[in-house]
């Protein structure tokens, strides 16, 4: 059970943007001063430096900053050559941005059920492969990377292209391999609440494929090459130089961000692990194949809605992801399928506060209130 702390906590917001800023105010203000003094706004050295740091960290040849992760996925599908009308299999347990990218790139997204771990499931993928299948889009949720061995084997066997939606997976690994590096390309989101967040929208594509990298660089800047020649119909999807500079300064100490999140996860595990009423994410060192970075701390809970109300009454912010629906559950999208594991998950899921501003006392407060709710 959580220890009583000296610090008196009466509320814990789900995310504390003000505190995140206050903790790094000087560094951020200095970056504004420097970038604005140089007038370095579009595709300047700060972007190049951040891209290099990201590529080096992940051990990939190319990291390309773009406007957001949704664009990153669209450009990756296009650059990989997704044919019009071709099918891409994706887990319905994801943000709508994942399949929307396929539709925007001209393909047909095919939703499948999740595995017991909440991520893409090889058996479900196998059952969904048809002669129209062209790609697979694993989604590495909550800072955890799916069991990729069978997915990669299947893609090789059926000659399918993998593009990973690793928007939530920066730094997470499966068998020592980084999320985003299992297929032709992977993407990351720098949306403010993401593990590496900027002050607005931002994203990146990573790839080891020179041609895909070349085409994405064209697409993001109106199809223009270095000489100003237009090689294809592009769009404007650049990562702002100022955002890149703000990301770069946070990324320099990325391991400490991951370590902090893993320690919060360990604290939740210790405080809640004995409750039969909740299912927790795997603990930080639960399995040697997985290195999780806890983009989110998403539990499954009995009486989920009552728990949320009770926590709110006690000043604790929680989140039910994506409006409480999997992609196939949005009626206007006309999927008309039933995916039982995913649907059951969305009846029970709720995210607890998980970010680097949390103090031990705040996490203890959340733990104590959850225990109180279940009468423990
Ligand atoms: C956040 C997110 C996206 C979209 O990222 P943006 O940068 O907001 O476009 C896509 N997929 C998943 C799984 C996400 O969590």
Image: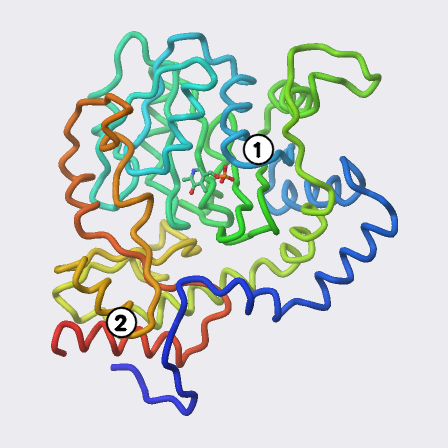
State whether residue 292 is above or below residue 232. Answer: below
The answer to whether the residue labelled 2 contacts the one labelled 1, judged by CB atoms less than 8 Å apart, is no
**Residue 8 left/right relative to 335:** right
**Residue 193 left/right relative to 129:** right
Quadrant placement of the N terminus: bottom left
State whether residue 337 is above or below residue 242. Answer: above
If you read the primary sequence from the N terminus, does the residue marked by circle 2 or circle 1 appear first?
1
Q: Which residue is mark 1?
A: 205
The mark lying in front, picked from 2 and 1, is 2
Label 1 crowd (10 A; few <14 / some 14-19 / many >=20): many
- The residue at 15%/44% (across/down) is 344
Residue 96, disc? none
Give the secondary structure at mark 2.
helix
Give the secondary structure at mark 1.
strand
Image spot of residue 69 (x, y percent): 52, 36
Query: Residue 222 sits in which quadrant?
Result: top right
State whether residue 360 is above or below residue 63. Answer: below
Query: Residue 317 sits in which quadrant?
Result: bottom left
Label 2 crowd (10 A; few <14 / some 14-19 / many >=20): few
- Viewer-closest of 113 and 328: 328
Image spot of residue 291 (x, y percent): 41, 53
Image spot of residue 280 (x, y percent): 25, 60
- The residue at 22%/64% (across/down) is 309
**Residue 71 left/right relative to 39:** left
Give the CA distance from mark 2 to mark 1: 41 Å
Q: Which residue is mark 2?
A: 313
Image spot of residue 236 (x, y percent): 66, 25
- The residue at 43%/88% (across/down) is 7
């Amino acid at each position: 059970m959580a220890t009583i702390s000296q610090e008196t906590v009466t509320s814990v917001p789900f995310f504390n943007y003000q505190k995140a800023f206050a903790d790094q105010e000087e560094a951020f203000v200095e970056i504004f001063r420097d970038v604005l003094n140089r007038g370095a706004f579009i595709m300047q050295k700060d972007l190049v430096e951040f891209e290099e740091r990201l590529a080096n960290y992940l051990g990939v040849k190319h990291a390309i900053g773009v406007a957001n992760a949704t664009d990153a996925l669209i450009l990756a599908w296009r650059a990989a050559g997704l044919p019009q009308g071709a099918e891409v299999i994706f887990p319905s347990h994801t943000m709508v941005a994942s399949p929307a990218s396929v539709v925007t790139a001209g393909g047909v997204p095919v939703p499948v059920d999740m595995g017991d771990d909440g991520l893409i499931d090889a058996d479900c993928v196998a059952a969904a492969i048809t002669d129209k299948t062209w790609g697979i889009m694993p989604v590495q949720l909550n800072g955890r990377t799916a069991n990729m061995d069978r997915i990669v084997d299947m893609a090789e066997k059926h000659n399918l292209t993998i593009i990973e939606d690793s928007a939530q997976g920066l730094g997470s690994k499966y068998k020592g391999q980084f999320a985003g590096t299992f297929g032709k390309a992977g993407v990351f989101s720098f949306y403010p609440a993401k593990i590496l967040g900027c002050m607005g929208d931002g994203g990146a594509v990573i790839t080891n494929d020179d041609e895909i990298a070349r085409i994405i660089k064209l697409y993001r800047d109106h199809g223009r090459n270095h000489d100003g020649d237009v090689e294809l119909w592009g769009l404007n999807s650049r990562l702002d130089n100022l955002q890149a500079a703000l990301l770069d300064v946070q990324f320099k100490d990325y391991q400490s961000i991951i370590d902090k999140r893993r320690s919060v996860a360990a604290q939740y595990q210790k405080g809640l692990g004995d409750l039969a009423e909740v299912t927790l994410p795997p603990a930080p060192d639960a399995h040697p194949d997985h290195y999780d970075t806890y983009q989110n701390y998403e539990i499954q809970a009995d009486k989920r809605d009552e728990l949320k109300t009770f926590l709110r009454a006690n000043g604790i912010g929680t989140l039910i992801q994506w409006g409480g629906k999997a992609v196939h559950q949005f009626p206007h999208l006309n999927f008309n399928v039933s995916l039982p594991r995913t649907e059951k998950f969305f009846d029970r899921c709720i995210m607890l506060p998980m970010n680097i501003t949390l103090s031990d006392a705040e996490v203890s407060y959340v733990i104590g209130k959850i225990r109180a709710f279940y009468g423990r």
